[in-house]
Image (tube, rainbow, N blue to C red):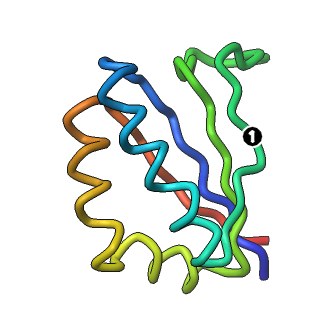
Amino acid sequence: MTAYVVIDLDVASPEGFQEYLDGVGPLLERAGGRNVLTEPDALVLEGDWQPPTLVIHEFPDKAAVQRFWDSPEYQPLKDIRRRHSRVRVVVGEN
C-alpha cells in the first residue's frame, strides 16, 4: 500500500534549511520515496489549518517511511532540519 507523508513546514532560516534540502533529496530517493508536492500557498477550503508550506512525499509503504525516518543517514539531516524549521509530520497509507 502506498504511504503518503504530509508535512506542515515552517522554515525559519532558508539559508540553513538549504543544507537539509541538499542532503535529503538523494536520501529520499534511495529510500524509495519521492517528493509529490511542495506548495507554499496551499488553498484552505475549510478549517483553520494553514501550513506555511505543504509538502507531500510518497513511499512504497509505511515500513519504507519508518526505515527512512529511523535511518542513521537521516539523523544528522533531521538535526539540521530542526535547527532551521518547524514541522508537523503525519503518514497515511492507501
Q: Which residue is drawn at 67% across and 81% down?
A: 61
| Residue 75 vertical placement versus 56 (above, below) | below
Q: Residue at x 47, y 31 (%)?
A: 9
In this picture, residue 45 sits left or right of residue 40: right
Q: Which of 87 and 75 is in front in this view?
A: 75
Position in image of residue 45 (x %, y %): 79, 17
Position in image of residue 79 (x %, y %): 21, 51
Q: Residue at x 48, y 55 (%)?
A: 24
User: Which quadrant of the rendered structure holds the C terminus?
Assistant: bottom right
Q: In which quarter of the image is residue 63?
A: bottom right
What residue is pinned by disc 1? 37
Position in image of residue 46 (x %, y %): 73, 18
Q: Quadrant of residue 31?
A: bottom right
Q: Residue at x 51, y 34 (%)?
A: 8
- Dot 1 lies on which element? strand
User: Which quadrant of the rendered structure holds the N terminus?
Assistant: bottom right
